Image (cartoon, grey):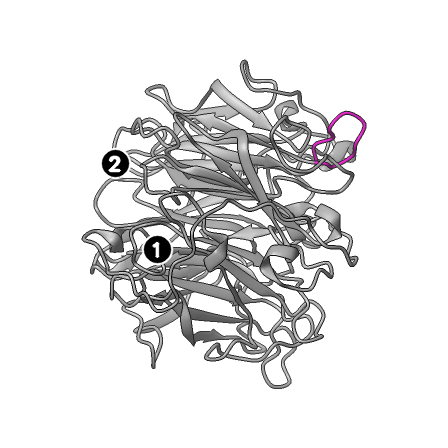
Amino acid sequence: MTQSMSKRRIGRGAGVAAAVAVVAAVTSPVAAQAADAVPTTPAGAAKLHDDFNGDGYQDLAVAAPRGKVGGKVRAGYVAVVPGSAQGIDLTRKQVISQDTPGIPGAAEAEDYYGDGLAAGDLDGDGYADLVVGSQGEDVGEVMSAGTLAVLWGGPRGLSGGTAVATGTEEDRVDPLHQALGDFNGDGHLDLATGNRLLYGPFDRTSGAASSRTLAFEAEYFTDDVAAGDVDHDGITDLVALIHDHSDDDTHDPDAKNRRAVHLRGTPEGLSAPALLKNPDGTRMRGGENLGIGDVDDDGYADLVIGRSADGSGEVPLDDPLLKGGQIGVVHGSADGPDTSRTTIITQETPAVPGGSEWGDGFGGGLSVADVDNDGYADVSTGSGGESIGDVYAAGQITILRGGKSGLTGNGAVSMNQNTTGVPGTAEQNDFFGADTRLLDADGDGRAELFAGAPGENRDGAVWAFRNPVSGPVATGSVSFGAGTLGTVADGSALGSGFAR
């Protein structure tokens, strides 16, 4: 049965007002690469799933799904900033829309191009490619049928593209929720969305090798999907967070509506979905955001579930720890997710900065990667609705550390726009931290932190944080927006989503 869908709120739950404003840009002084210089592909570069130009550095891809393009409001665009030995290099940025030569489609009002991004080497040529969703794309007479396209990597970055999924009235594309992984162990990346599975290898002419409908349950809404080897058998598994509330009220945190399912990767492809249950047999609570990584370095990928919706005090909570949002960790095992080994972290957890308040959104905008190169995956999360002092929904970001005992509050760090060294000032409805991304753009083995604020100056902006020793710091952080990208500042919601 075809899944119903609704358009995601910008910033994964945070509403953003549209207005014309220019984000002041601060950039790092990185030398530009000569226009005619083509970097060679170093050995192992293909392992970096965000390395679009094959130079051995991960590149940043960020969406502005409400951006004005060619006078078309909310057409949307994607900004790509290459990595380098000094970090992201804004002098070599790319701004890509459906009006860019070689890109499938054409920029139209309310396409929301870029609302859903995933990065990986889909054609096996050693260069990462970028999957871009367009949730508002009309197909013929079908309104908002949705499309997915792959933009192809190469020595000069992304160029050209191929449409790989086009929606119909009966089978609309869900571009918002994407996960890449080798779900059948054949050595080729596959693409899973909230309602379909595309098997690789992908071809620049014909697209996916094959595709099929993916149904987690008979009637459901997808909150998020993520891929990782949870059972450590060498084949990627898929995990989905779903709910079946009749009116798709994503602010209702009721456990009976929110759940998680695990699909094991096998040589024949993904298994049937298995509902995750607590040790007592009750349904395990799902959430709104999902990441997967090995936070305790035991070889099994762990689920990091962000439960950022708390009802804002309007609905009774069956779990008081949901106030302000929480992160739940479910550890991996040979049998898949082990719900007998779970951890809950909130802003009331010892050593985690701040305190839990209604509507904070803690647990939103999750990213999982190793920030200190100690072998344990760490977690970044945003609290886009966090009030800073008396400033409503200014937003905050937090880094949580993995370790032998898993994810804890020990060593946690939080930052906002009033933190010394962070560009800008905390303002109402900035939604700073609506999404975050951990990415090793300078190739030193330690992931740096990137954060989006889609409400910044009513247009959106992105912050990049240095990681000089053992984690992201405010000192030396920079931000960029429409002024740097050369785009129109018109409520673009830049920073509402990063490639995953």
Q: Which of marks 1 and 2 is in front?
A: 1
By secondary structure, the bulk of the magenta-drawn segment is best described as loop
Looking at the picture, how far across and down is residue 368, in whole percent? Answer: 42, 38
Relative horizontal placement of residue 454, taking residue 231 as reference (left or right): right
Residue 159 position, x and y percent, is 41, 72
Q: Residue, x 25% and y 61% (percent of image)?
A: 126
Q: Position of residue 178 (x, y in %)?
A: 46, 57
Magenta highlight on residue 21:
no
**Which picture quadrant has residue 470?**
top left
* Residue 40 in the image: above or below residue 163: above
143 or 270: nearer the viewer: 143
Q: Give the range drawn in magenta.
A: 385-394
Residue pointed to by mark 1 = 51
Relative depth, front residue between 368 and 67: 67
Q: Residue at x 51, y 49 (%)?
A: 224
Is 388 covered by the magenta stretch?
Answer: yes
Furthest toward the bottom, the residue is: 140
Question: Residue 61: horizontal and vertical position, in percent?
Answer: 48, 55
Look at the picture and state if 292 lies above or below 119. above
**Would you name the residue on which mark 2 appears?**
334
- Residue type at tag 1: Asp
Is disc 1 placed on a helix, strand or loop? loop
Q: Residues within 10 Å of mark 1 (few under 14, many from 20)?
A: many
Q: Nearer the viewer, residue 214 or 179?
A: 179
Q: In this view, does 121 lie to the left or right of 427?
A: left
Which three-letter amino acid code belongs to the residue tagged 2? Ala
Residue 285 appears in view: no
Q: Which mark is residue 71?
A: none
Q: Residue at left 40%, top 50%?
A: 83
Answer whether residue 133 is visible to the viewer in this image.
Answer: yes
